[in-house]
Image (cartoon, rainbow, N blue to C red):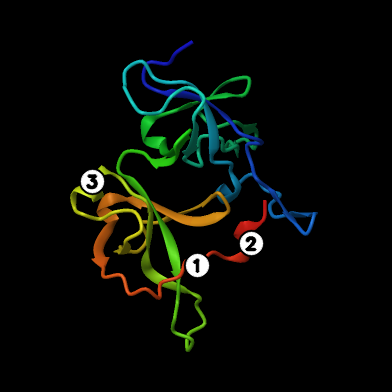
Amino acid sequence: MKSLYDFIVKPIGETYNNEINIDKKKLILNSKIESWKFVNRFAEVIETPKAFKTPIKKGDTVVVHQNVFRTFYDMKGKKKKSRSYFKDDLYFCSIDQIYLYKNKNGYNSFGERCFIQPIKNNNHLVADKEQKLIGILKYGNKSLESLEINEGDVVGYTPDGEWEFLIENKRLYCMKSNDIVIKYEYKGDEKEYNPSWSKSS
């Protein structure tokens, strides 16, 4: 069972992440299927596409687009699975719907995607605890490396290009390589900003 152009994946856990645990108690965050922010984005690779050679292997964990597992209501109000649905607990996932993959060596960005860790705002006169449009490159890629922008560097990025993901209890922003517009000199006082809710699982 192989697809020609798509990966075949299955969700790790449920298709929606509607609950978190806080102090050994469950807190329900979402009760509506319309909210894309709570769609599960972690999947196990069951089969790789025949038409492409990628570093992603069967059994790897991948971080995917929210629409892969998303459920919705059609115009008649009927509840339907996403158009990526294949059968049983399996879904098709196109190559451009994968942003990150994990193998025995840890997490790796995929394609032109990269992930940014927000940093704390050192200005105590403003209410926002997170610096805007500045962060630490957590997962880079070859395009950025060719520009001498490496993981751990402090970078600036364009507005509205970042998507929020929760990776290993860290809130990260996913974006494309060309959203990174500047590399800052490391000052030494940069600290990662990770809100407390992101550490709940």
Nearest the viewer among 35 and 74 is 35
SS under mark 2: helix
Residue tagged by mark 2? 197
Nearest the viewer among 106 and 39 is 106
Residue tagged by mark 1? 193
The image shows residue 56 at horizontal and vertical percentages of: 40, 28
Q: Which mark is residue 143?
A: 3
Outermost residue, right side: 25
**Residues under labels 3 and 2: Cα distance?**
33 Å
SS under mark 1: loop
For image coordinates 25% across by 53% down, the residue present is 178
**Residues under labels 1 and 2: Cα distance?**
12 Å
The image shows residue 124 at horizontal and vertical percentages of: 48, 86
Q: Which mark is residue 148?
A: none
- Horizontal placement of 50 versus 23: left or right? left
For image coordinates 26% across by 70% down, the residue present is 185
Which amino acid type is marked by label 1?
A: Tyr
Which amino acid type is marked by label 3?
A: Ser
SS under mark 3: helix
The image shows residue 12 at horizontal and vertical percentages of: 61, 34
**Residues under labels 1 and 3: Cα distance?**
26 Å
Relative to residue 193, is residue 55 depicted above or below? above
Outermost residue, left side: 147
Which amino acid type is marked by label 2?
A: Trp
Q: Are marks 1 and 3 in contact (CB under 8 Å)?
A: no
In this view, the mark in front (1 or 2): 1
The image shows residue 78 at horizontal and vertical percentages of: 65, 33
Mark 3 or mark 2: name the one nearer the start of the chain: 3
Relative to residue 121, is residue 106 depicted above or below? above
Q: Are marks 1 and 2 in contact (CB under 8 Å)?
A: no
